[in-house]
Amino acid sequence: MEADPAAEPRPRGLGGPALFTGVLALVFAFVPIVGEYVAAPAAVVAVVLGLVGFDRAERGLADDGARALTGGVLGLVAGLVVFFVFLATLG
């Protein structure tokens, strides 16, 4: 007797790590000096994890596409905040 493949739980994927990294990047983005060393790399990681996680969810390999997309967007926003804070501290 075979198990129904639709009943098997899908793995969580990269939504959790993308969301965590995106929130971390956004929090540290508002700190002028730390933001350049912590938030900028974390924002890049969040965007990459968000894109990969959302792609996996779209293909049906994971079930947390919304969290992955949210983490990616937060990473993008954090990257923009770091960029503007960096520009503001130059002059």
Image: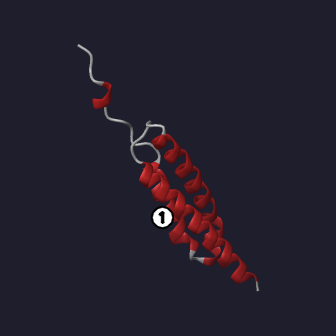
Which of 29/8 is in front? 8
Question: Which quarter of the picture shows residue 84?
Answer: bottom right
Which color mode does the image show? secondary structure
Query: What residue is rendered at 52% in x and 64% in y?
Result: 74
Q: Residue furthest left?
A: 1
**Where residue 87 sits in the image (x, y, percent)?**
72, 79
Q: Residue furthest bottom?
A: 91
Which of 33/6 is in front? 6
Count all numbered tags in the image, as a single digit: 1
Q: Secondary structure at mark 1?
A: helix
**Where residue 16 sits in the image (x, y, percent)?**
43, 51
Query: What residue is rendered at 42% in x and 40% in y?
Result: 62
Question: Which quarter of the picture shows residue 47?
Answer: bottom right
Q: Is residue 50 above or below residue 59?
A: below
Query: What residue is rendered at 46% in x and 57% in y?
Result: 19
**Where residue 85 sits in the image (x, y, percent)?**
65, 78
Q: Is residue 1 above or below residue 47?
A: above
Per the image, the residue denoted by label 1 is 23
Q: Quadrant of the N terminus?
A: top left
Residue 20 relative to residue 84: left or right:
left
Q: Residues within 10 Å of mark 1 (few under 14, many from 20)?
A: many
**Where residue 33 sits in the image (x, y, percent)?**
64, 75
Q: Quadrant of the C terminus?
A: bottom right
Query: What residue is rendered at 70% in x and 82% in y?
Result: 89
Residue 86 relative to residue 64: left or right:
right
- Amino acid bearing label 1: Val
Q: Residue furthest top?
A: 1
